[in-house]
Image: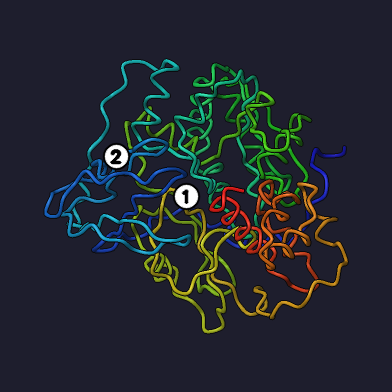
Amino acid sequence: MKKPTFKKGIHPPHSKHSEESALVECPTPDTVYIPLSQHIGKPASPCVAVGDKVKAGTLIGKAEGLGANIFSSVSGTVKAIERRKTPTGACDHVVIENDGKYETEYLPELKDNSKESIISRLAEAGLVGMGGAGFPSHVKYSPKKTVDVFIINAAECEPYITCDYRLLVEHTKEVLKGAALLAKALGLDAFYVGIEDNKQKAVEIIERTAGELSLKVTVVVLKSKYPQGAEKQLIYAVTGRKVPVGGLPADVGVVVGNVHTAFAAYDAVENNTPLFRRALTVCGGGIVEPKNLWVRTGTLYSDCEKFCGGAKDDCVKTISGGPMMGFALPDTNYSVTKTTGAILFLGKEEANTLMPGPCINCATCRKVCPMNLMPMYIDAYALCGDFASAKRYGAMNCIECGCCAYSCPAKRPIVQSVRLAKRMIKEKGL
């Protein structure tokens, strides 16, 4: 039987080397550096001062506008509020000295699990989309348009990353119950799970557990292809609906949620726990021991690296996120946030270290682009500074999946050109 999928895309090696590595707790360091910007929107405003005593779960950054609350991940003392680098720029961080006691402050117990109470708890607990986008959950699950379909995105299509898969097989009940809560927030009593066919073990566990819990869950097994987990592509594969250019999933009556966000929703509603830790994957041929970790926010990448045995001598590239959509880093002095799904250490045979060549007009990037764009023109116009033309060729519609750069025989960094174009189009108000 032909499995559902989307048009175009690519088939990179899965490289799920950490797939059978159960989630383990990463030791928390003596000092954590917690960014006040871990989401789309305005950074949170600090609500603690140097010298304050805090617990894990203490509110340290209050959401303003489109934003999300930030919580301490350890108990201890606030030592500083300082500006530090992030993989995409810089922001203020709350520096906390860990006292090693891990005393925890919980949210007040909910009086009921009504739609309104769930949405309020999502805001209170600081939930965001944990697949990488970081959109504040209380806004996402309060759509202004009528929604009749909710999809849990369990595709996890990027190579190497396996933390969502481990949540699905180790914490199936929590994920499904959390998904049911998110569906309820949308006014629905049923939901879909879209998952690739290379995760058959998880499919079987989900279907069995959904039956045990008497939940209305439809598992849609999708063809393994990248970027199957991209929102618009997933919606098309599961429902056949097409999100219009420049539109949102709610425009076609759909909301897509992440596996980890569902788990965090369960933890917030049922256990009154704010969001201050997450599961992530440390993998790649350049790390001694690939693992899936539970990590408290503010832990440095270097601490995760150390716990996994350190980088090998032949490690040539470190990436925050996946190999297709992540950001290459000069070092590991960055903090884990709510949206850090992976830290990759790539060896010489895995990473492209070649200098890019000139475009040869082969149109390979166009043939694989799941958004039906012409990336070679966006790249060319961005590099010559003609950002109006880059916009005309659809720069703002690019989902930055990296299919173009992966397939380019000249090894051109097309996604970087697109990101430049997007930034300049916004800055210039084009």
Q: Residue at x 51, y 19 (%)?
A: 184
Kindly give the residue lying farthest to the left in the view shown: 51
**Rendered image coloring scheme:** rainbow
Residue type at mark 1 is Thr
Which quarter of the rendered picture does the N terminus lie within? top right
User: Quarter-wise, where is residue 230 in the image?
Assistant: top right
Please determine whether, in this image, residue 420 is positioned above or below residue 128.
below
The circle drawn on residue 357 is: none
Please determine whether, in this image, residue 120 is positioned above or below residue 20.
above
Q: Residue at x 42, y 70 (%)?
A: 332
User: Quarter-wise, where is residue 94 in the image?
Assistant: bottom left
Q: Secondary structure at mark 2?
A: strand
Residue type at mark 2 is Lys
- Which residue is more in the foreground, 176 or 394? 394
Foreground label between 2 and 1: 2
Q: Residues within 10 Å of mark 1 (few under 14, many from 20)?
A: many
Mark 2 in CB contact with mark 1 (< 8 angstroms): no
| Mark 2 or mark 1, earlier in chain | 2
- Which residue is more in the foreground, 65 or 235? 65
Residue pointed to by mark 1: 339
Q: Is 30 on the left or on the right of 160, as rendered?
A: left
Q: Secondary structure at mark 1?
A: loop
Residue pointed to by mark 2: 62
Q: Percent from the top left, x then y, of residue 266?
A: 43, 31
Q: Percent from the top left, x then y, of residue 169?
A: 56, 43
Total of numbered circles in the picture?
Answer: 2
**What's the distance in space between the residues labelled 2 and 1, CA to CA?**
18 Å
Q: Residues within 10 Å of mark 2 (few under 14, many from 20)?
A: some
